[in-house]
Image (spheres, rainbow, N blue to C red):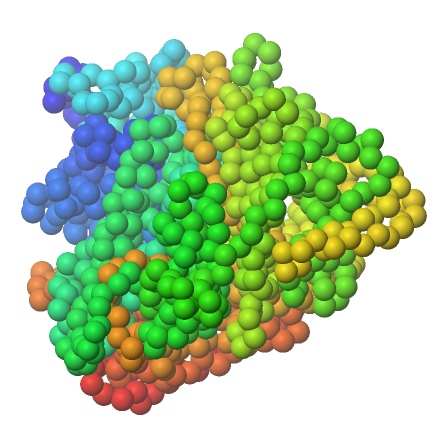
């Protein structure tokens, strides 16, 4: 690469200044002077506009190559590395042995510091806590195994808002300080004026001060160096210019390279930098000033960067008396250590988050909560499949250490999906804010990883069956037939329905012992040529069952041993406009043991839901609406991948609703089809709502208490944002509750703003949202993230004469009841389901970020309704059951009349209902558990070459309830590892580890920050029981257990 002609002069100037006597004050500071910590960094998006491969080729590989070289040349230089995906790719594919040795030395000296240490800088609004931990664990495991370091500081400079779950996550991972940037523009302005950008954050209401963390909010300049130069029309401090795609320029000249530091510009640069340091200092309480040096895609030519900054820093330090400032290269750790050494009493912040985020009055970043809904759904399904594959593989290895599968190859199959799931958590990944080609990259990697893990699970099942076949000779007349192997990845026994697509309505289902299994068959909503077979399955924790499916003969049909066939009742299309002319309401119920759903025959819409045990009724009506958004900048603000800027109120998306009721013994399905008008042939939206009946002898508590809903949305018209509005008579006073990352609940009170009130009252829903009044709750559970809001209310006055049509045993019976005139106040719960946008904003067009998403999405919701004690007791297990639905593997397997029960079915683990097995995994780490020994091995260059360590099992358990949330379920719980792990050998050693597994908690001494006296609640129960690193031995009985409160 050719360098600019002025570069050799800079080297001479830099050398003279750094060797001069007055430059020795570089690290010193005098009382009263500001001390600026210049932190070199490059913000490297793992996706966004360009794919990972394109970024590696254009600039990312050059960042680490040139930084390594330049830090080795100058002992005063430093750099922070953030996203591990790019570093790991460089390390494994690009770095030479010499460069690797240099990196080891730089890390040892503390001049190259790994910050966060995860694979990516994950989003905080729409990611699930399990996936955040996964991506952090992947990066931390690599860093510890390779360098023996454990990141201690965060650098969350670009996620669009800040969740209260994140400080807890980083605290449990062993971090000492946390840094964020993007919070509401008006809030940041107020905090700057009041010097309250730094505080101690107690993010968890249960963990409180035990897991607090010091938090720094970046000022208005955020993570990029201020680029304005009063003496130049070029950006300042970006001497290497802007990265060029697809390849670096051969001559080394990049666009917009800053004016070089020369004798003529040196003092001008110094004055500009000092002025900015002083401006920033006025917003903070100490004389220590964080001065980030870098921005997106910087330091791909570190030589020119440092060659210009070296003399500038030296000049300022040589004139520190004049400027009142000293400057130094620093890592983020240097800055936080300086703050920690100060005798300052910091304010505290409770569990309130910084969501949603607005950057300007009409720029509310709430659209991305729903952008690219298909990607959001696939990412979560991939995570769920990985969760199942991890526990199945762990059990297989521990039970069959000499099994027929290659454990190294199997571990690589898991690692492929770990990498893909971790990658998509990037803050321009699962958010849906990336370009189409990057979206395709994420999808490709996820689907390939899912295929690999599904293949692994099939191989495990097949190997187990081969062993069973050898142990038990085939019975006379035995045959192979289609079999649904259903694996339950949760550590509870579940009773649920699994769905299999079949080609005939005449089938029978039986289990491993040849016993008939309750099943129902009905016509499919996906194809007119197939049928949906619902199989009622009860499966113990971390176990599987086998369900054989074969064509039913006449004897089985006559004796009702075949799957029952549901009947379909058609109600035609009804217009909502014409319903206003009807003098009475004709209502009919759809009933199971827990709920009675009343449908309005005049409109084909839902009318109300009654929780039968309490006999409490909530009026519930669901309709689709659309926001029309502006596409022309000349006519006002726009919506895009990030922003939601509605152009007025949402309008009805359909006028006509078609209705079918599919009624059966086990499943009743309400199918609603929403048409824009009577002349439309194809429906615009559809909802399929199911309730279940469980036969006697089955524990159907969770199954009975949910209304499953599948929505079909799209393709939308251009510049439309589709929402589902659920209108209820719950007087929630426009207070909504949503989850932070599936971890804790936030209270959301409706607020009125001068501008953009609708958009600024949308919040992220990762798994859970609910509204309540003093009598009932309505809970929504979701398998992907959405934007959700509790918007305005309205009144409706109705004179009702109800006529009930009771649907029972496929007969219609009419009941009439007179009702008096009453007034109902409706409160709205709105969920954004899908977005399709285009605009003429040049920046969006240049990077293809207009979100012209023509896909059809099918999100799933579970509704829970009833008194608060009922829904509180059920929603935590229900959301886990939705997140981790059983994995169904269809295979041709031997049919034996005396086939033993499924894998681990006899002595399967069973956690109590308030605990969740968050992970059971063999990570395959190759380092010593003893930290000192591991560092010594690294120092000697010794690395274990015998392959991954399969004896070390990582176990993480999460308490599902906050303190005080439920009188019984919030209580601490004792966990008996002997019972939990009895199938996997002897527990030889138990170590309580940090959340990502790299710290033994006995060695973890996080910094204490001085705060005003805080009267805590004395809370002791932990939401997460940190990692237990459990090396297991085969062929021995368990002899120890671990108990934790």
Question: Which residue appears at 30% of the width and 63% of the height?
Answer: 483
**Left or right: residue 299 compared with residue 647:** left
- In the depicted structure, whether residue 316 falls above or below residue 260: below
| Position in image of residue 45 (x %, y %) | 33, 35
The residue under the point 13% across, 42% down is: 93
Instruction: Give the image quarter of residue 615.
Output: bottom right
Left or right position of 671 against 843: right
Is residue 671 or residue 261 the one in the foreground? 671
User: Image quadrant of residue 826?
Assistant: top right
Q: Residue 844 location in percent, x, y?
A: 43, 20
Vertical placement of residue 659 versus 841, above or below: below
On the image, the x and y values in percent for residue 523 come to: 47, 47
View extreme (right): residue: 820
Residue 660 at what x, y percent from top left? Answer: 60, 43
Taking the image as shown, residue 747 lies to the left or right of residue 949, namely: right
Task: Tally the numbered discs.
Answer: 0
Q: Is residue 728 above or below residue 906?
A: above
Q: Is residue 728 above or below residue 944?
A: above
Left or right of 301 in this view: 857: right
The N terminus is located in which quarter?
top left
56 or 794, which is in the foreground?
794
Q: Which residue occupies the foreground of this view, 634 or 451? A: 451
Query: Which residue is nearer to you in this view: 538 or 155?
Result: 538
Query: Is residue 305 among what the camera can see?
Result: yes
Residue ID at (77%, 38%): 793
């Amino acid at each position: 690469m050719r360098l600019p002609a002025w570069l050799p002069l800079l080297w001479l100037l830099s050398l003279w200044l750094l060797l001069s006597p007055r430059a020795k004050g570089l690290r010193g500071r005098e009382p009263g002077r500001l001390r600026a910590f210049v932190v070199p960094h490059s913000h490297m998006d793992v996706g966004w506009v360009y794919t990972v491969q394109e970024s590696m080729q254009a600039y990312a590989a050059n960042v680490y190559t040139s930084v390594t070289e330049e830090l080795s040349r100058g002992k005063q230089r430093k750099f922070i590395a953030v996203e591990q995906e790019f570093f790991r790719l460089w390390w494994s594919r690009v770095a030479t042995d010499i460069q690797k040795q240099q990196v080891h030395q730089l890390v040892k000296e503390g001049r190259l510091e790994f910050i966060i240490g995860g694979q990516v800088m994950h989003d905080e609004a729409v990611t699930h806590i399990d996936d955040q931990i996964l991506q952090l664990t992947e990066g931390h495991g690599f860093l510890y195994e390779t360098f023996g370091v454990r990141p201690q500081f965060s650098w969350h400079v670009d996620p669009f808002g800040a969740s209260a779950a994140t400080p807890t996550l980083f605290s449990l991972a062993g971090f000492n300080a946390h840094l964020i940037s993007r919070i509401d523009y008006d809030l940041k302005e107020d905090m700057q004026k009041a010097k309250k950008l730094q505080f101690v954050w107690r993010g968890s209401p249960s963990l409180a001060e035990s897991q607090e963390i010091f938090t720094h909010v970046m000022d208005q300049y955020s993570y990029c160096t201020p680029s304005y130069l009063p003496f130049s029309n070029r950006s300042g401090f970006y001497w290497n210019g802007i990265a060029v795609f697809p390849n670096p320029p051969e001559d080394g000249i990049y666009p917009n390279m800053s004016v070089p530091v020369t004798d003529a510009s040196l003092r001008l640069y110094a004055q500009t930098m000092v002025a900015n340091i002083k401006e920033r200092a006025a917003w903070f309480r100490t004389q220590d000033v964080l001065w980030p040096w870098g921005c997106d895609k910087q330091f791909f030519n570190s030589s020119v960067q440092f060659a210009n900054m070296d003399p500038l820093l030296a000049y300022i330090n040589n004139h520190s008396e004049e400027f009142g400032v000293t400057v130094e290269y620093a890592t983020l750790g240097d800055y936080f250590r300086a703050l920690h050494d100060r005798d300052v009493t910091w304010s505290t912040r409770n569990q309130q988050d910084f969501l949603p985020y607005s950057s300007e009055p009409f720029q509310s970043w709430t659209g991305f909560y729903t952008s690219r809904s298909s990607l959001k759904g696939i990412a979560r399904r991939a995570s769920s499949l990985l969760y199942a594959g991890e526990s199945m593989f762990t059990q297989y290895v521990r039970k069959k250490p000499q099994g027929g599968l290659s454990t190294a190859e199997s571990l690589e199959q898991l690692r492929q999906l770990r990498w893909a799931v971790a990658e998509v958590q990037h803050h321009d990944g699962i958010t849906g804010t990336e370009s189409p080609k990057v979206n395709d990259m994420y999808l490709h990697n996820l689907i390939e990883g899912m295929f690999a893990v599904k293949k692994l699970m099939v191989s495990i099942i097949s190997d187990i069956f081969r062993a069973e076949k050898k142990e038990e000779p085939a019975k006379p007349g035995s045959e192979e037939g289609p079999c649904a192997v259903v694996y339950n990845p949760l550590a509870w026994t579940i009773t649920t329905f699994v769905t299999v697509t079949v080609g005939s309505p005449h089938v029978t289902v039986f289990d491993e012992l040849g016993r008939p299994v309750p099943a129902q068959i009905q016509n499919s909503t996906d194809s007119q040529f197939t049928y949906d077979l619902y199989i009622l399955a009860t499966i113990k924790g971390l176990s599987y069952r086998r369900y054989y499916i074969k064509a039913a003969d006449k004897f089985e049909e006559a004796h009702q041993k075949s799957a029952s066939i549901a009947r379909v009742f058609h109600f035609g299309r009804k217009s909502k406009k014409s319903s206003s002319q009807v003098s009475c309401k004709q209502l009919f119920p759809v009933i199971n043991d827990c709920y009675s759903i009343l449908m309005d025959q005049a409109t084909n819409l839902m009318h109300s839901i009654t929780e039968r045990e309490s006999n409490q009724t909530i009026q519930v009506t669901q309709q689709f609406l659309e926001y029309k958004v502006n596409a022309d900048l000349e006519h006002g603000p726009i919506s895009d991948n990030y922003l939601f800027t509605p152009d007025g109120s949402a309008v009805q998306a359909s006028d006509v609703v078609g209705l079918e009721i599919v009624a059966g013994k086990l499943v009743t399905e309400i199918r609603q089809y929403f048409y824009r008008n009577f002349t439309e042939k194809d429906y615009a939206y559809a909802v399929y709502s199911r309730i279940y009946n469980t036969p006697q002898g089955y524990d159907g508590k969770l199954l009975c208490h949910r209304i499953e809903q599948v929505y079909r949305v799209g393709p939308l018209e251009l510049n439309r944002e589709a929402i589902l509005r659920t209108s209820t008579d719950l007087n929630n006073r426009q207070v909504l509750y949503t989850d932070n990352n599936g971890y804790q609940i936030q209270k959301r009170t409706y607020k009125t703003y001068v501008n953009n009130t609708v958009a600024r009252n949308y919040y992220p829903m990762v798994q859970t949202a609910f509204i309540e009044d003093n009598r009932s709750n309505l809970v929504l559970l979701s398998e992907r993230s959405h934007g959700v809001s509790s918007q305005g209310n309205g009144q409706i006055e109705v004179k009702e004469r109800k006529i009930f049509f009771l649907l029972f045993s496929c007969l219609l019976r009419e009941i009439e009841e007179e009702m008096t005139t009453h007034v109902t106040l409706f409160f709205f719960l709105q969920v954004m389901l899908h977005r399709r946008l285009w605009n003429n904003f040049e920046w969006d067009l240049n990077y293809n970020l207009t979100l012209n998403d023509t896909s059809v999405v099918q999100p799933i919701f579970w509704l829970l309704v009833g008194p608060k004690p009922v829904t509180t007791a059920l929603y935590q297990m229900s959301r886990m059951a939705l997140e981790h639905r059983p994995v169904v593997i269809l295979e041709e397997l031997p049919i034996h009349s005396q086939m033993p029960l499924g894998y681990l079915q006899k002595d399967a683990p069973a956690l109590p209902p308030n605990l969740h097995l968050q992970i059971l995994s063999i990570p395959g780490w190759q380092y010593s558990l003893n930290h000192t020994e591991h560092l010594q091995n690294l120092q000697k260059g010794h690395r274990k070459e015998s392959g991954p360590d399969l004896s070390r099992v990582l176990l993480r358990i999460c308490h599902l309830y906050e303190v005080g949330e439920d009188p019984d379920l919030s209580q601490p719980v004792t966990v008996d590892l002997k019972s939990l792990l009895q199938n996997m050998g002897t527990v030889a050693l138990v170590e309580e580890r940090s959340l990502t597994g790299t710290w033994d908690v006995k060695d973890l001494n996080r910094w204490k920050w001085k705060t005003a006296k805080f009267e805590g609640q004395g809370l002791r129960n932990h939401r997460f029981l940190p990692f237990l690193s459990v090396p297991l031995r085969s062929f021995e009985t368990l002899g120890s257990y671990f108990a934790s409160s």
